Amino acid sequence: GQTPMFPRIFGHEAGGIVESVGEGVTDLSPGDHVLPVFTGECKDCPHCKSAESNMCDLLRINTDRGVMIGDGKSRFSINGKPIYHFVGTSTFSEYTVMHVGCVAKINPKAPLDKVCVLSCGISTGLGATINVARPPKGSTVAIFGLGAVGLAAAEGARIAGASRIIGVDLNANRFEEARKFGCTEFVNPKDHDKPVQQ
């Protein structure tokens, strides 16, 4: 559903170190360890001030925006021509430029090559389970897809106290690892002739 906008630097999940900050930025300093957040927070709009939403009026995810919000210009170029941003993060690059609201400061002792998945996969799956689905203690939960997001969703279901956590995936090689994240049983749709929900 994205508007074609090329050339563009993709990527949204990463960890990094602040190289410099722009005028007026007081929350971050050079040397800070950070994670990008493609659904940023301005901290001022009604959504940011609400405990019920993270859909910031200014920095909500927008796959069609390829420029900085402040001035509507790209911070990347090649041979004088702009290269567009992606969801305010553009992490498939050695350096990137982000709005301060799309950056979360983290403990500098956290290994960036491991905590980078917190900037999307883990927070998405865990948050979807704990904050949106909110499974009651003792409930049965099915997780469709056992990649990073699915494993984090399973962990969220475990934390919430679900008694049955059914992992559904076409790749049975993922089942044993998923057990570590709380899955109690598994279904591979390839093993059945009827729809898996039956």
Image (cartoon, rainbow, N blue to C red):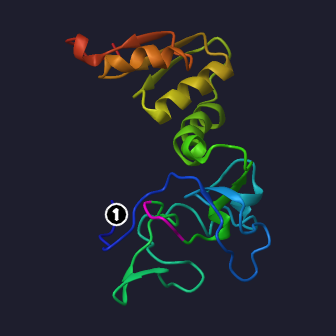
Q: From the viewer's perspective, tell me whether residue 194 is left or right of residue 92.
A: left
- Point 72% across, 83% down: residue: 23
Return the residue nearer the eye: 36 or 162: 36
Residue 56 versus residue 161 in the image, above or below: below
- Point 36% across, 70% down: residue: 8
Residue 153 versus residue 198 in the image, above or below: below
Q: Residues within 10 Å of mark 1 (few under 14, many from 20)?
A: few
Q: Quadrant of residue 175?
A: top left
Q: Give x and y (percent) for residue 111.
A: 63, 43
Return the residue nearer the eye: 4 or 34: 34
Q: Secondary structure at mark 1?
A: loop
Residue 28 versus residue 25 in the image, above or below: above
- Point 61% across, 15% down: residue: 162
Residue 117 versus residue 88 in the image, above or below: above
Q: Quadrant of residue 146?
A: top left
State the extent of the magenta-drawn residues as a range.
92-96
Which amino acid type is shown beneath numbered disc 1?
Answer: Gln
Q: Specify whether residue 155 is in view.
A: yes
- Point 34% across, 63% down: residue: 2
Return the residue nearer the eye: 40 or 106: 106
Circle 1 residue: 2
Q: Is 93 covered by the magenta stretch? A: yes
- How would you classify the magenta stretch by its main secondary structure? loop
